[in-house]
Image (cartoon, rainbow, N blue to C red):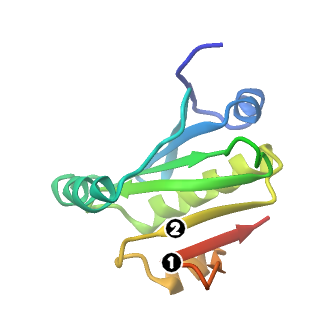
Amino acid sequence: MRLFETITDLGQGERALRRRRYGVIETARGRLIGVHLRPWPKRVSHFEARWLGGRFHRLSGDDRCFVYYNQPLGHSRFLALTYAVSGSGCTLATLHAAAGALDAVARIKQSDAALCHVTSGRISDRLLARFGWSPHCLSSRGRHFIKRY
């Protein structure tokens, strides 16, 4: 098994996607570029989410989106959407492609749900609802969402 692997066809890469816990979904111009499988999970700090993510968004005018997901150890029926970053030129079609790819990965992994903690004010609750996400852990601090499959 290679440490890093890229899947460009989800149908042909089902076995690898089912086996590997950590990945990055890359979409551009409204289509899937690939799912880059990683040997370790994406850990995100508030510094990275606020400063580096915002900097990437401002400086990159590309129609591109990266979505990092983890399948936590001990919780194999769930996916955690840990980080998403896009260029300032990212279109709704590219976001739809990323959301569709995340749903496909969840289906392949037979996940019950995906979870995320939204820190960006640019992502509205209405947009998340449009993509099938609903509020979760309302008693917890922050904006937590779940998408049940």
- For label 2, the crowd category at 10 Å Cα-Cα, with few meaning under 14, some 14 to 19 and many 20 or more, is some
**Which residue is disc 2 drawn over?**
117
- Above or below: residue 93 compared with residue 136: above
Name the outermost residue toward the top.
1
Please name the residue shown 60% across and 45% down the image: 70
Image location (x, y in percent) of residue 127: 51, 80
Confirm or deny contact between disc 1 and disc 2 (CB under 8 A).
yes
Secondary element at tag 1:
strand
Rendered view: 140 above or below 73: below
Which residue in the structure is indicated by mark 1? Answer: 143
- State the SS at label 2: strand
Q: Is residue 61 left or right of residue 114?
A: left
**In the picture, which quadrant includes the N terminus?**
top right
Determine whether 139 is above or below 120 in the image: below
Q: Residue at x 58, y 32 (%)?
A: 8
Residue at the image point whose x is 48% and y is 77% from the top:
142
Considering only order in the chain, which callout, 2 or 1, is on the residue closer to the N terminus?
Answer: 2
